[in-house]
Image: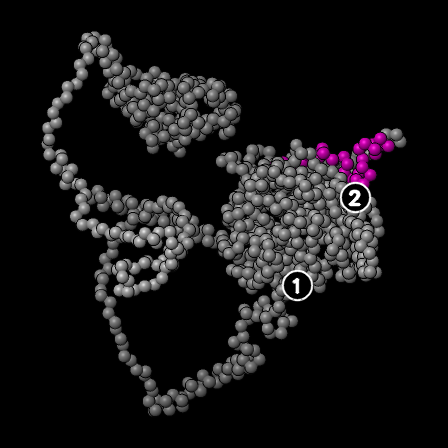
Amino acid sequence: MSENLISSKTSLKGPKTSAKKQKGENKAKESSKGKQTQLGKNDEVDLSMAGMGHPEIFPLVFTTKTQEIFNCRVDEDVTEENCFKLIKKEDIIQDLKTRATISDFDPVKKVVLEYPGEELLVVFDAKFQYGQNFYFVASEEAKENLLKPPETAEEKEEKEEENREETLEVHPYKPPVHKPWVSLGSEKEVEEESVKDTVTKIKYMISRVRRKFGAPIKFTDKNASHVKDSYVECTPYQDKTFSIKMLEKDVGVQMVPKVREASTQTKWTYPKNAATQYFPRQLSDEEKEESLSSEKLKEFLTSVHLRMEIALQQNEIMDAFFDDWKALTEDESSSGGKPDVYLKAYQSFTDLRYLKDRSISCVCWHPTIYGIIAASARQRLSYEEQVNLSDKSLLQQSVILFWSFFDPIHPQLMLECPEDIYCFQFSPSDPNIIAGGCINGQVVLWDISQHEEKLQNAKTVADGIEITAVNMVNASIPNFCTQQSSTEPPLVKYCAVSSIQYSHKKPVTDIHWLPGYFEDNQMGATFENRAETCVQLVTCSPDCSILFWDIPATKLPEQPSSEEVKEKEIFYMPADVPDTFKHLDLCWKPLIKINLCESDTNTEYCPVRISLRELHYHYKTSEKVESLNTLEVPAKESPYAEMSSPSSKKLRVLENISTDFFVGTEDGEIVYSDWKMEVNSDSKQIQKYIIHTDAINTLQRSPVFKDIVLSIGGRNFAIWKEGVTNGAILQSSCAAGRYTAGQWSLTRSGVFFIGRDDGNIDIWDLLKKTHEPSHFQNISESMITFISPWTASPKQHFLAVSDDLGVLRVLEICQTLSHPSRNEHANILDYFTKEAKYLKYCEEEFQEYQEFQAKTELRWSWKHRGRKQV
């Protein structure tokens, strides 16, 4: 043992290695064995390298703080050549008292206290021979052997050889003399082992007439007997055996079969076919008459007469063979046949100028105005271009287009964007405020309050355009061009954009407004928001970060002079840009930054979708939205213009706010964590689940159940229940196509829509089927990029679907998919609860099975050892 220790440790100091003398080996072995037994008695958990033959070595992890305290910094105080460091025992004991369990010597506290010497030897393990960056030696003899290795036998032999070479005389060089070769029979063995052809080879000579060289060749079928030259041409034909295309894939599998011996004392018998002949027992005529005329039978009939009569009446009233389970999900209004499930085409929008060769990235309905829908577009990039976004062409302007049901040809409004927009959202407290995330990681704010009246009067404007078009049928071409140019939608410039230095380093893939009833500070604490105005945002990006943005209150400055106002208007403030968020432009910084990584393994996660429980809000819409004409809302000032910063001392902390969130990563992982910063913990508790094989494109909470989350990525989807840490309560099988988008239904708790890369939409109804979609419908020829449902009225429900060709389609959802059936909410809730219990039960059963299997293998190993000893 000590010999191995010396040989392995002296290699750190120099290239020479040696072995100890025989007496030193015996003493080292005896001392190390005694030390091993002593440490084994005192320590409850043995952290030494006894399994490798070094019980006096204890590997440790020295953090940067510990290296600075004991002056053993890597590559400065200790190196791979000079790897030894002596530390006083008193200093280690003082560190254990001051730092307690945080000290790196805490796992070997007892070994340090029982060490007999005054100084401990700590060795820097640069090659991680024992699994950690440092280890210390718990034996005085081993410490001396490492610091002062004895002279080995090899070194003595080398010195003796050097002395001999000096004493030897120098002899002159004599060239070697050639000697005759003497055969010992090896050539016979070579001849016997050599391979020789024993079969005579057949020779063929193929000839052709000289004049036929270079002539065109024609292949025909002929018989050999009809040919004069006695040869037949071999005509080519297609062999189906070699036309099969096979995909080759290199797969490496490493496996070890389980070998198990079993014995039994059961006697094996040859199976035989056996048959038994029987006949029924029947009563004789006399016995029948006697039983029918008995008093016992009369009493029995009298006692069951009333119950039999009630049972017959119930059979007449109710059908005993009616299948209640099959009729559970049927609607009462159905006429007995299958209900019609469809998505009816209602409207479609596209633009040849701004949406040509572009893919729609995000779609949002206007929260309060009927028939207004907004869509953002981005360039269709390959995977290499997405990785290197600097190669993106900037020739085409990036905008967000607002469309109206009443004018599908011309956009009603356009929002100017500094870069392509990946996602955007309307503010719940003020729909005129819009926040978006760019492809370069910046966050942008718009204010469309000046154009709200134009969106509300979209129907009137559309009617006027139609009338003008009818009157201009016979008009000239120049007049038509003038009328077309007059319908150009207004371009709204952005109010503020975040600072590039403090923004995301990669595209903003998801953005959400925090609710208006609470507000976060820089430490992650949640306070009440008395203004009830949404002033905070949360964004995520594949740069492994989640940012919380705060819109600070505007401070009322002193009234400047009229000359200063004119100068600012001329040089700083364009006339068409709203001054709502001018104090944030190019200097907006995030309030909180969360880096998703594990401290133990330094594993980083790249979030692309985020879902917070407290984001479960609904926009306040008018109850009279059923009519197509929108109600005229009186103009009012934006709540963001009247914001004032309240005193933090008067605000109370909200303890019942959930700070947990789900994150979908770029690698298909689902991560569950908490954004609140803990004072006593350095790292966050992160739960990771690997189910999807591709990036997560949808991570949405159910509009009905706050703790139910739908995740879509790759070729499958999963449903999660918050609080269930065992995994997904429902996981789909691998689909034929790739899923690209998905959304829950706003009215039915068990229905959700999933878009695929082949242009189809799968409609899942958990009340009918859970293993496959209940219906599917083809929508487009290209990939579905985004799905957004909207409830216009209790009788009118829409589904916006965009594709990769830049076409936005609005589909009307049928009554079967929009109106919930009776007790649907309770049935779906019961289904999710049962799946969660079943998942927990399966995990417990699996753990019990593993424990039983481990015990069985242990018993078998002991029995096998006993048999070998006998």
Indicate which label's residue lies in the foreground, 2 or 1: 1
Q: Is residue 573 above or below residue 857?
A: above
Expressed as whole percent of the image width and height from the top left, the position of residue 277 reads: 27, 79
Q: Which mark is residue 558?
A: none
The answer to whether one can see residue 830 in this image is no
Write down the quadrant of residue 678 in the picture: top right
Expressed as whole percent of the image width and height from the top left, the position of residue 181 reads: 12, 27
Measured Cα–Cα span from mark 2 to mark 1? 39 Å
Seen at 46% across and 51% down, the residue is: 843
Q: Secondary structure at mark 1?
A: strand
Q: Is residue 744 above or below residue 576?
A: below
Seen at 66% across and 47% down, the residue is: 377
Assess disc 2: are there few (<14), some (14-19) or many (≥20) residues with their C-alpha within 10 Å of its C-alpha. few
Expressed as whole percent of the image width and height from the top left, the position of residue 151 reads: 29, 15
Seen at 41% across and 31% down, the residue is: 131
Closest to the observer, 756 or 795 = 756
Q: Which residue is mark 2?
A: 639
Residue 776 lies left or right of residue 808; in this view the side is left
Seen as rendered, the residue at the extreme right is 562
Q: Which mark is residue 344?
A: 1
Seen at 29% across and 64% down, the residue is: 223
Asked if the stretch drawn in magenta spans residue 317, the answer is: no
* Label 2 or label 1, whichever comes before in sequence order: 1
The answer to whether one can see residue 442 in this image is yes
Q: Which residues are magenta?
A: 565-594
